[in-house]
Image: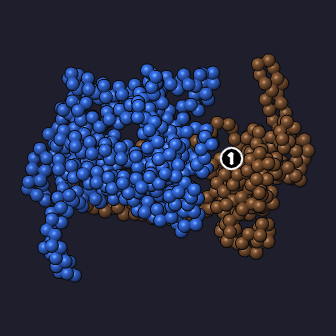
């Protein structure tokens, strides 16, 4: 048996000499720092969710009908008449939301431990591109069930392009292929959602990992294990504080996968709409251009950016500032490696100012999410019955917009002019022998 | 360290689910909880009986097939075809009302909506409260109004069960219009108020089932999936522990 396996292996190696070296370079001889903590599960979990979306997506497309007349019915057909169709759809819809949960945590990890800094700028930029494509992918997927929130969400989001001077209105018609989101819009979104964007996404993920493995993984201490002492049990030239990705991190990630799947299964089987956050009430009504839902809001994962759009007022006779602010919020994240000039990577050894600024970023991001989801508009009249809701919501939301953008301005000033008082960074990871 | 992280995350997750679902279900006006239980087959059967006696004249359940409903509710083909199917539809066909769309528009001002997904679009609490909140209002074309859905086009379909409710208004004062304080039963129906609440709860449960037939199945499957995953995670943990013995 073992001999047969060896012969099979040799057969492949003779014909594809690049395969084994590739496997070694990225799995058994990729030396990752041994001090990864909880925050390092989310990269592999993102891949797991991506695979889940592709596999469940394939089965959904077998029964989904791409037509404004049939789309809504076909989704209910999947929910009722297709064997295990409800499970496949809930795995896909829950997966979409959990994708963003995982990616947000993954990005936060990168900011907290300075993983975006030299020499990993390219890894970070590729990651931001993944995030952008993921948002487009999620938005178009949300339109496909052709519920009433799909329709109105699409209308509002596509209308954003109408704020661009001169070409805006023609651009909106060009995107929709009609004067309203309609059959043409649904068909092109389907094409982009199931073919174009997934291919781009997969390519970017491969590049993201390839770029990472070129420079090596960061870690919670932010020290470069590649620059530390050499020699471990497996290789005299490998970093002393590195361990082979396979089997060490593959078995460790398996534990993360287990915990993650327990949470995912709980949602899928016991709370698939997640109280109206993952599948909204208004999307169980078919698309209707004559009936506007009482609150048009995007899916929860867009709400922080949507709130930035809503909170920035129009002036000089154009509403484009909000749109610029929304895209600027993402662009600033992508520019982080050049905004943050600090030499120290990890929050463990950075100055107090950075810790406070990071907390402000998280709080304002979450608060903007509540504003964008319409939570503040409902909570304010309950807590303060006599307050003017719009005034107070705007005041609260704008402070949070300042908090979000303030993080980047503060960080540049703080690090560029040398205000940051860092702690000494250890030579090696703190858990070495 | 890791244990502390896990318990923190579990706690945060629990708080998040609790507070967000509490917020999402509030949705503005105060609604009494419907208290439905879709796994109670007897309740679903009573609800189906009410639906096919009082609702199907106008409202369809176009995504619900008689045959599927029979097997989910534990009814035989004969029981469904003789007692619930009044339209002459075949056993494998969906529940479609015989009301002509054009006629409905003339009689009620709008077409009665399909109710297949009503429980998911509006929520079960909304349906339960709506069914209990009809009152006589001579100013409306059909003589009925509703406090949960003001100026609804539908007259109270269950009036012979509930009886007639009238609104008790508060005193109007300068700057404040009279508002409805409560609804009073001015003429009792065939059921006591307690029985009527139970009947509307059954009807709501049936609509909840109709909106998501998979709800019956998914929770029982989910328990096994979670048990499997708990075992899987435990084994994965042991495996990790074994492999990481020599990493210090």
State the quadrant of the N terminus of chain B.
Answer: top left
Q: Which chain is brown?
A: B
Q: Position of residue B179 (x, y in %)?
A: 79, 29
How many residues crowd around disc 1 within 10 Å: few (fewer than 14), some, or many (20 or more)? many
Give left or right: position of A255 versus A87.
Answer: left
Q: Which residue, as the protein is rendered here, is positioned at the far top?
A: B174
What residue would you read off at disc 1?
B125
Question: How are the residues colored?
Answer: by chain
Q: Nearer the viewer, residue B180 or B224?
A: B180
Q: Position of residue A320 (x, y in %)?
A: 42, 29
Name the element at disc 1. helix
Residue at 52 percent across and 26 percent down: it is: A393
> Is A430 situated above or below B76?
above
Q: Nearer the viewer, residue A9 or A291?
A: A291
Q: Position of residue A34 (x, y in %)?
A: 22, 50
Give left or right: position of A354 versus A418.
Answer: right
> Is A12 situated above or below A30?
below
| One can see residue B50 in this view | no
Q: Quadrant of residue B42?
A: bottom right
Give left or right: position of A280 versus B230.
Answer: right
Q: Nearer the viewer, residue A180 or A80?
A: A180
Q: How many marks?
A: 1
Q: Colour of chain A?
A: blue
């Amino acid at each position: 048996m073992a001999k047969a396996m060896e012969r099979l292996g040799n057969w492949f190696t003779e014909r594809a000499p690049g395969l084994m070296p590739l496997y070694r370079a990225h799995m058994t001889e990729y030396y990752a720092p041994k001090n990864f903590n909880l925050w390092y599960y989310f990269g592999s979990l993102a891949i797991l969710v991506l695979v889940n979306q592709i596999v469940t997506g394939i089965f959904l497309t077998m029964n989904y009908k791409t037509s404004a007349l049939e789309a809504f019915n076909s989704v209910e057909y999947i929910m009722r008449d297709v064997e295990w169709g409800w499970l496949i759809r809930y795995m896909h819809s829950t997966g979409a939301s959990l994708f963003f949960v995982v990616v947000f945590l993954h990005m936060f990890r990168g900011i907290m431990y300075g993983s975006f800094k030299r020499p990993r700028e390219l890894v970070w930029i590729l990651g931001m591109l993944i995030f952008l494509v993921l948002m487009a992918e999620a938005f178009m997927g949300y339109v496909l069930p052709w519920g009433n929130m799909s329709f109105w969400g699409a209308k509002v989001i596509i209308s954003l392009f109408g704020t661009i001077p001169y070409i805006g209105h023609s651009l909106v018609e060009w995107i929709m292929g009609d004067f309203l989101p309609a059959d043409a819009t649904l068909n092109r979104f389907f094409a982009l959602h199931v073919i174009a964007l997934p291919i781009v996404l997969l390519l970017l993920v491969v590049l993201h990992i390839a770029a990472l493995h070129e420079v090596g993984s960061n870690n919670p201490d932010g020290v470069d294990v590649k620059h530390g002492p050499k020699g471990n049990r497996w290789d005299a030239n490998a970093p002393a504080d590195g361990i082979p990705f396979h089997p060490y991190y593959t078995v460790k990630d398996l534990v993360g996968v287990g915990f993650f799947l327990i949470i995912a299964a709980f949602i899928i089987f016991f709370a698939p709409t997640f109280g109206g956050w993952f599948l909204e009430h208004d999307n169980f009504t078919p698309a209707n251009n004559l009936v506007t839902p009482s609150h048009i809001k995007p899916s929860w994962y867009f709400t922080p950016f949507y709130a930035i759009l809503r909170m920035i007022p129009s002036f000089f006779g154009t509403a484009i500032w909000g749109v610029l602010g929304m895209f600027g919020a993402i662009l600033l994240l992508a520019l982080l490696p050049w905004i943050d000039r600090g030499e120290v990577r990890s929050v463990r050894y950075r100055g107090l100012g950075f810790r406070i600024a990071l907390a402000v970023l998280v709080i304002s991001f979450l608060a903007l999410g509540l504003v964008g989801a319409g939570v503040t508009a409902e909570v304010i009249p309950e807590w303060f019955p006599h307050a003017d809701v719009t005034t107070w919501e705007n005041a609260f939301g704008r402070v949070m917009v300042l908090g979000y953008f303030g993080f980047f301005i503060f960080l540049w000033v703080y690090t560029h002019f040398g205000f940051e008082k860092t702690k000494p960074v250890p030579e090696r990871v703190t858990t070495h022998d | 360290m890791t244990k502390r992280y896990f318990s923190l995350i579990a706690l945060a997750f629990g708080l998040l689910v609790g507070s967000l679902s509490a917020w999402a279900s509030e949705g503005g006006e105060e609604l009494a909880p419907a208290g439905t239980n879709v796994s109670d087959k007897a309740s679903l059967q009573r609800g189906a009986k009410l639906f096919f006696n009082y609702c199907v004249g106008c409202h369809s359940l176009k995504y619900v097939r008689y045959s599927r409903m029979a097997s989910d509710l534990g009814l035989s083909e004969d029981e469904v075809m003789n007692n619930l199917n009044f339209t002459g539809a075949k056993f494998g066909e969906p529940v479609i009302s015989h009301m002509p769309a054009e006629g409905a528009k003339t009689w009620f001002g709008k077409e009665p909506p399909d109710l297949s997904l009503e429980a998911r679009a509006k929520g079960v609490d909304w349906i339960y409260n709506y069914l209990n909140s009809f009152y006589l209002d001579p100013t409306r074309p059909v003589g009925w109004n509703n406090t949960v859905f003001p100026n609804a086009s539908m007259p109270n379909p269950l009036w012979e069960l509930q009886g007639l409710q009238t609104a008790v208004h508060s005193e109007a004062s300068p700057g404040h219009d009279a508002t409805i304080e409560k609804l009073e039963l001015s003429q009792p129906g065939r059921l006591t108020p307690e029985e009527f609440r139970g009947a509307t709860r059954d009807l709501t449960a049936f609509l909840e089932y109709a909106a998501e037939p998979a709800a019956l199945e998914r929770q029982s499957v989910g328990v096994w999936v979670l048990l499997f995953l708990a075992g899987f995670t435990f084994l994965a943990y042991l495996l990790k522990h074994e492999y990481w013995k020599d990493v210090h």
